[in-house]
Amino acid sequence: MAPGDKTKKSQPASYSNSHPAQSQSGKRADDHETTEACFTCKEKECHVTTVKGLKQKITNPSWVYCDSCMMWYHGMCQDMSDKDVANLHKLKDKPGVKWFCSSCTLEIEMTMKGNGDVGMTSAANNGVMNGKLGKIEDMVMKLADALSSNQAKIEDRMQKLEVSYAQAVSSNLDGVKTAQQLNSDAKAQFSQILEHQQAEYRKKNAIIYGVEPEAGRTTMEKIQELMEDVSFPTAAKPLTAKRLQTSQSSVGIKPGPIKLEFSDEGSKWTFLKRANATLRPKNIYCKLDESKALRDQQYRLRQQIKEMKEQDESGTQYRVRNMKIQAKSTGDWEHLPTGRTTIPQPSTH
């Protein structure tokens, strides 16, 4: 670049492409190209004249950038100390702060005062502005080309990301379904094992109903008293007796049933048969310890019998046998057909 050529911008090539907004402001000393010369002294290195008339070289001179003519100057060539240049760079970090060289400052002052050749000054300013606008247009065109070339790459990348995301979602859903299936199978298997264990445990248990509680006496003492009253075999004595809490016992309608645990099934059956044969007159009876599902089913059947009795005024009797409802009016007990809530009235002939 010719030292006196003011039509070409003296700034690094990297700034012309990536920092177009700093074409007039924000220039710092570290932006200066080492191949450029000061526009004042026309030299890359700064020299000062000593009192003896000798030139002395200044190592690492400070540089300043004119935001009007867009040229670089030694700070000393613009009558600025290193401290002045440093302060200027700090100020130029702020938006809207500009610095002009002594020549441009004179032209600006002449233009503002109306002195000198205003036409030439305006023409010079127009030339500078046109040069700046031309460079800005070039940079905008380059940016547009870069964006256009990257658009296809961006679209391709987005498409690949969408495909990858869809595959990940599909794989994750398959994994979730598999995990849910395994969890469901594990729950079913655990339920079967638990139900089997409970069924084995219930084989040694029996439930006795109608035994009234007595203050100051334990449940086990009440059971032993009943056994002594009707001469139960000693081998049929239960190991434990625990009164259960039910909705009926909580409101005081009936005493809560008692769960009896025996040492083996034989003792349980001996107690159950003896209790049902001898304690019925006292409204005490004994049943097997059944599962909750079976008890719920029996409860629904009893509720159904209750509804049928409310609807039937003929005096028909109802009961549950083998998980089915039986009815009797004058003859034998008969199983009700599935889905029936009443039985036909007995024939008169």
Image (cartoon, rainbow, N blue to C red):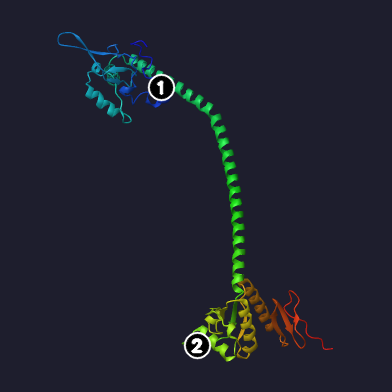
Depth check: give the residue in front, 253 or 38.
253
Task: In the displayed orientation, state which residue is furthest to the front.
Answer: 235
Give the CA distance from mark 2 to mark 1: 102 Å
Q: Tell us which disc is closer to us: 2 or 1.
A: 2
Depth check: give the residue in front, 114 or 47.
47
Task: In the displayed orientation, state which residue is furthest to the left.
Answer: 51
Residue 232: x and y, percent?
Answer: 60, 87
Label 2 crowd (10 A; few <14 / some 14-19 / many >=20): few
Depth check: give the residue in front, 330 or 273.
273
Helix, strand or loop at mark 2: loop
Disc 2 target residue: 214
Q: Looking at the picture, does residue 202 appear above or below residue 210?
A: above
Q: Quadrant of residue 127?
A: top left
4 vs 243, left or right, is: left
Q: Quadrant of residue 139?
A: top left
* Kind of residue indicated by mark 2: Glu
The numbered dot on residue 26 is: none
Q: Quadrant of residue 61?
A: top left
* Kind of residue indicated by mark 1: Ser
Q: Looking at the picture, does residue 185 appear above or below residue 80?
A: below
Q: Earlier in the sequence, mark 2 or mark 1?
A: 1
Task: Residue at 32%, 23% (x, y): give it.
Answer: 30
219 vs 128, left or right, is: right
Helix, strand or loop at mark 1: helix
User: Where is the C terminus found, in terms of image quarters?
Assistant: bottom right
